[in-house]
Image (spheres, rainbow, N blue to C red):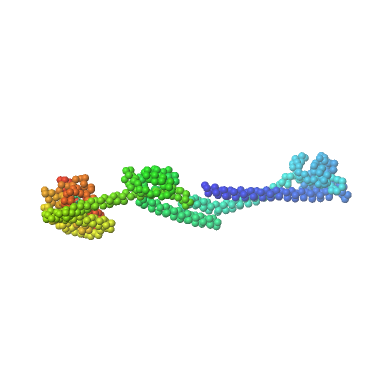
Amino acid sequence: MKKKNLFYQFFGVHILILIAAISFATYYTWFAMREAFNRQWLQELDIQTRVAATVLLDADGALDETAVSRFFAQAGDAFEHRFTLVRPDGKVLGDTEANAASMDSHADRPEIQEALKNGTSVQRRYSTSLGKSMLYLAHRVPAEGPAAAVVRVAVPEFALMREIAASGRTLLVLVTLVIAAAVGMGYVASLRIIGPVSALQSGLRRIGDGELTFRLAVPAVPHLAELAKSINQTADRIAKQIHDLAEERNLRTLILANMARGVIAADVTHTVKDINAAARNMTGFHAPLTPATRIGEVIRHPDLLRLIDDCERAQEPIERETTIGPDGEMTVTARVTPLNDTHGQSMGTLIIINDVTHLRKLETVRQDFVANVSHELRTPITSIKGFAETLLDGAKDDPATAERFLTIITRQANQLEAIIHDLLDLSRLEQNSAQGIEKAPAPLAAILRNAAGLCQDRANARGIRLNVTCDPALTPPLHAGLIEQALVNLIDNAIKYGATPERPQVDITATATSGAAEIRVRDHGNGIDKPHLDRLFERFYRVDKGRSREMGGTGLGLAIVKHITLVHGGTVTVESDPARGTTFTLHLPFALAME
Ligand code: ADP
């Protein structure tokens, strides 16, 4: 439709101009041609009239009666036009087409009057006697001296028009042919230009609509070809720029989306312009952003909102630690920075939220641990110091008391050593969990037997039987030394806390499924109360402090077991039942196929 419009606009204007120009030229030609005809006719009539006058006059310039009667008797056939001879008083003396005697006076005829006055007259008028428009040309004879008569020649106007019309028809045919040829050529030329222009126009529209891979076909018309080429080059440049911008934007979005810190950008009207996934998780705002999303809808924590206000007032970055979340369970440090453009004009605010809950928890754990360690170390040291001082104060003089005190001091020193030993083990394991341990396929049955062997004396001392059950073919990849240490801790606990005289037995078993080994240490004691089970693997946690100390426990044994399983990528669980005793299970996954 548009193509048609463009074509007809172009072609229509072209044709209108052409027709106007040809019409003007035709009109002018026709007008000039008619004038030339008229002039030619008048000239011819003038000559004929003068010839007739010469014939009709004698040598003195008077009318020659004989010549007059001969002329009008014969001239009717010889002359194509009508000749009339009129006396100055209006009497008609002769006429080539009518009987002069019966003709009325011509004294009132304007051409006769004018010829008598001026010598010559040309008149166009309607002839009442003939009933048609006529052209009259009259001459007074003789031209000089008193008038003898007036010779008049008359031509019907239609005779004149007939010849002009014949020439006009030829002109019309020629003009029609010229217009037809011009329209035809104009049509072809318009098609040649408008076709490529329309193609350029629709191509440009496609590129403008976002079809950036579309390129214009280069037309044969030279100027349009240049235009199409430069449009294609511009489209290439725009496509590249859009591609680069999109990549940059994608990268920015990716970086923002994958940042652990929450990022929120707001403009000066507090409309949120951007928010990343971390900030959504921290604030709990998951609705899509709209132009109407205000910062107060996203951040609902008064402390953070106050921080934004403070930053806007101070116009400098402010950082503060606060708690967020429904129950204030998340500790965050929020840094609010004013965003200014290159002219220092404020564009909004950038809020960066860093979740430090885990860090703060770790700090608390570390502080608790230091407090616990100090407490655990202080107990045996106080005891050693107290008994040593009592000995120095005189108790050493009594050998029995001295021996008892020295035995206590030795036990407390051992306890101290055991605590330091376990702490060092834990610290080494923490280092290992960061660096990773070296695992190798190891015969599980041998590890179980070694661990049981190391506890055998203590078991014998209490009359407890250690049962080891393991398929000798099991060789999962693990760190044999660490697993043995974990088993010793578990078997030792089972001997110390789990075995009862009624069921003096500890079962140590190992099985393997595809991808994991499971080692169980089970006693048949009175079990552990449920509330303790969750905290059992914490450092220095004991169910019965007194009993543990009495048994020489450090409160670190199970924490060490937990770390050993962790460095193997595994887990340790405990099940306890007062009627059936306690079972600790090490679940150790591995990726290698067992050999
Ligand atoms: P401890 O050096 O005191 O033995 P552990 O970390 O090895 O420290 O054990 C923590 C506490 O768990 C022990 O003090 C004891 O109260 C309890 N416990 C551990 N193993 C058993 C068990 N098999 N039966 C009952 N209680 C146990």
Along the line of sight, the residue nearer the viewer: 81 or 142: 142
Image coordinates of residue 344 in percent, x first then y, are 47, 50
What residue do we see at 49% from left, 50% from top?
205
Residue lying farthest to the right in this orientation? 60
- In the image, 217 versus 432, the foreground residue is 432
244 left or right, relative to 386: right
Residue nearer the viewer, 330 or 149: 330
Question: Nearest the camera: 329 or 584?
Answer: 329
Q: Can residue 314 be seen in this view?
A: yes
Residue 524, given in percent of the width and then of the height, sits at 14, 49
Numbered marks: total:
0
Q: In which quarter of the image is residue 94?
A: top right
Image-based side of 93 in relation to 340, left or right: right
Residue 565 falls in which quadrant of the image?
bottom left
- Residue at figure coordinates x 79%, y 50% from the top left: 47
Image coords of residue 281 (percent x, y): 35, 47
410 to 66, vertically: above or below: below
Residue at 14% in and 55% down = 396
Q: Which residue, as the protein is rendered here, is positioned at the far front?
A: 394
Eyeballing the image, is 57 above or below 421? Answer: above
Image point (84%, 48%), residue name: 143
Residue 215 in sight from this viewpoint:
no
Q: Indicate the quadrant containing the C terminus: top left, top right, bottom left or bottom right.
A: bottom left
Q: Is residue 345 left or right of residue 505?
A: right
Q: Where is residue 523 in the image (x, y as percent from the top left)?
A: 15, 50
